[in-house]
Image: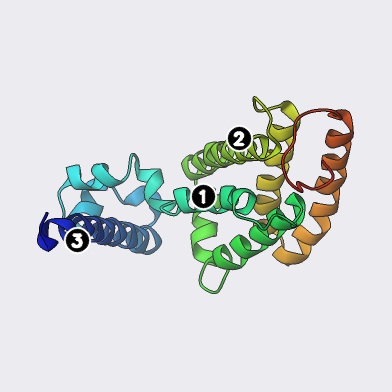
Amino acid sequence: MSTHGRSAPGRRERKKAATRQKIADTALRLFLERGYDAVGIRDVAAAADVAVTTVFAHFASKEALVFERDDDFEQRLVRAVTHRSPQEPLMPALRREVQALLRHCTGDGAGPLWRMIDESPALRDYEKSMRLRHAEALAVAIAADLGLPQVTIACRTVARFVVDAFSLGREATDPEAAVDEIFPMIEAAWEVACRAAQGTPRSRAAGPC
C-alpha cells in the first residue's frame, strides 16, 4: 500500500471534523445573535456554506448543534472509570473529572449559552435526555469495572448521582464548591451499595467495593 493510500483516511477524517466544528460554531453564533427559536437549520447551512444534508450528516437534530460536545462529555466520564490508575478509588476519580468538566463548561463566556439553554424548553428536554444517556454509559462502565455480569440498580443510581452533580454544579454560584458538597453524599450512597453487594465479583480498587 502506498504512503498516499495510508494518509488519505486521516485527511478525510480531519476534513470531516473541521466541517463539523464549522457548522457547530456557526450555529452557536447565530443562536446567540438571533435567538435559538429564530434560527432554522437552513439558516445554519447557508451561513456555514454547506448543504442542509451536510448539517444533518453531522448532527441528528437542531438541539444537537447546541450540545456538540455531547459524545466527548460522555467519553470523559467513562474514561474516568476505565483509565484511572489501579490504586485510585472510583469516587475520587469521578469527582475530579466532574470538577474538570465544570471548569471547562462554565468558564468565561459560557453564561449566554447556558441562559439560552435554560430559557428553551426544547433544549432543556434535550439536555435531560442527554444526561440520562451519559448516566447509562457511566453505569455500564462502573459495572464492567466491578466485574459484574450486568448493570445493577446500584450502578445506575450512583451514575445518575454523578451526572446530577454536574448539572447542579453548573447551576450553582460556585460550581466546584457545590460538587465538593455533593460528592460526600454520593460516596456515602456508594458505600451503602457496596455493603449491600457483599460477595459480588469485583475487579481492582474500585472505592469501598
Residue marked by disc 1: 75
Quarter holding the C terminus?
A: top right
Q: Determine the CA span between mark 3 and mark 2.
A: 33 Å
Callout 3 amino acid = Arg
Tags 3 and 1 touching, CB below 8 Å? no
The location of residue 12, given as percent across then percent down, is: 19, 56
Residue marked by disc 2: 140
Q: In this view, does 157 lie above or below 162?
A: above
The location of residue 28, given as percent across then percent down, is: 37, 60
Callout 2 amino acid = Val
The location of residue 157, given as percent across then percent down, is: 73, 34
Name the residue at 74% across, 39% down: 158
Hey, which quadrant is residue 199 in on the image?
top right
Instruction: Bin the neighbour count of mark 2 within 10 Å (Cα to Cα): few under 14, some 14-19, many 20 and up.
Output: some
Callout 1 amino acid = Gln
Q: How many labels does the image show?
A: 3
Instruction: Bin the neighbour count of mark 3 within 10 Å (Cα to Cα): few under 14, some 14-19, many 20 and up.
Output: few
Whichever of labels 3 and 2 marks the residue nearer the N terminus, that label is 3
Q: Determine the CA span between mark 3 and mark 1.
A: 24 Å
Q: Determine the CA span between mark 1 and mark 2.
A: 12 Å
Whichever of labels 3 and 1 marks the residue nearer the N terminus, that label is 3
Name the residue at 69% across, 29% down: 148
Instruction: Bin the neighbour count of mark 1 within 10 Å (Cα to Cα): few under 14, some 14-19, many 20 and up.
Output: few
Q: Which of 209 and 94 is in front in this view?
A: 209
Tags 3 and 2 touching, CB below 8 Å? no
Quarter holding the N terminus?
A: bottom left
Element at badge 3?
helix
The location of residue 53, given as percent across then percent down, is: 18, 42
Whichever of labels 1 and 2 marks the residue nearer the N terminus, that label is 1
Residue marked by disc 3: 11
Tags 1 and 2 touching, CB below 8 Å? no
